Image: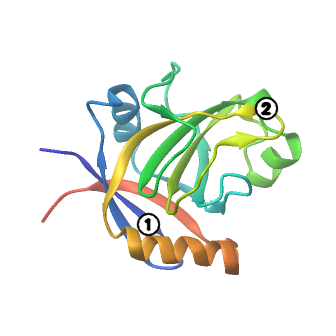
Amino acid sequence: MSRLLRITLAKRGVSCIAELLEKEAPRTCEAVWNALPQGGDAQHAKYARNEVYTMVPRFSESSIGQENPTVTPIPGDVVLFDFPGGMLDEEFKSDKGVSGLPGVIDLAIFYGRNNLLLNGDVGWVPGNVYATIVEGLDQMAQACHDVWRSGSVGERLVYERHTEA
């Protein structure tokens, strides 16, 4: 039986269900599953286009490494990025509340097309696609777009285990 995540924009009260891609990204799936629940301030991407993400402290002692990487995520992709502390701009880290950490995990969902993970400061930024949204993408996409239009202040992006009833 597949393992499922519930991903929620808490303030907006919208959730979607994602299925872990355990064959394609086993290390990433295991690390995320064992670290759940996770969540933090929701942010909308500036450069990648149709992405909402949250940054959390690293939850794995060892590096997960790349598996099932992409730089062109599609709608419904659930992606993990592992950023070493020195990769992120100090002002950005301060704004996200992660300045003192040696690195962070970025948990992201992609809700629309034409995404490109290219950062002007560092170049290509591949992420591990470890799950795909299988239920509620349309409603989540509307809520994510509202994060873009109306702002992310007070919004939290929460990841937790989902068990089918």
Place residue 88 in its image quadrant. top right
Quadrant, the N terminus: top left
Q: Residues within 10 Å of mark 1 (few under 14, many from 20)?
A: many
Q: Is residue 110 above or below residue 69?
A: below
| Residue at the spot 32% in from the left edge and 31% down from the top edge | 24
Q: Which residue is mark 1?
A: 8
Counting from the top left corner in percent of width and height, residue 44 is at 66, 62
| Residue farthest toward the top in the current orientation of the protein | 62
Most extreme residue toward the front is 114
- Residue in the image at 81% along x and 48% along y: 92
Q: Is residue 68 positioned above or below 159 on the image?
A: above
- Where does residue 145 sit, x and y in percent of width and height? 58, 74
Q: Residue type at mark 2?
A: Val
Q: Quick check: can you spot residue 10?
A: no
SS for dot 2: loop
Q: Quadrant of residue 22?
A: top left
Label 2, on which residue? 122
> What's the residue type where badge 1 is placed?
Thr
Q: Nearer the viewer, residue 20 or 34?
A: 20
Q: In percent of the image, x 23 and y 46: which residue is there?
A: 3
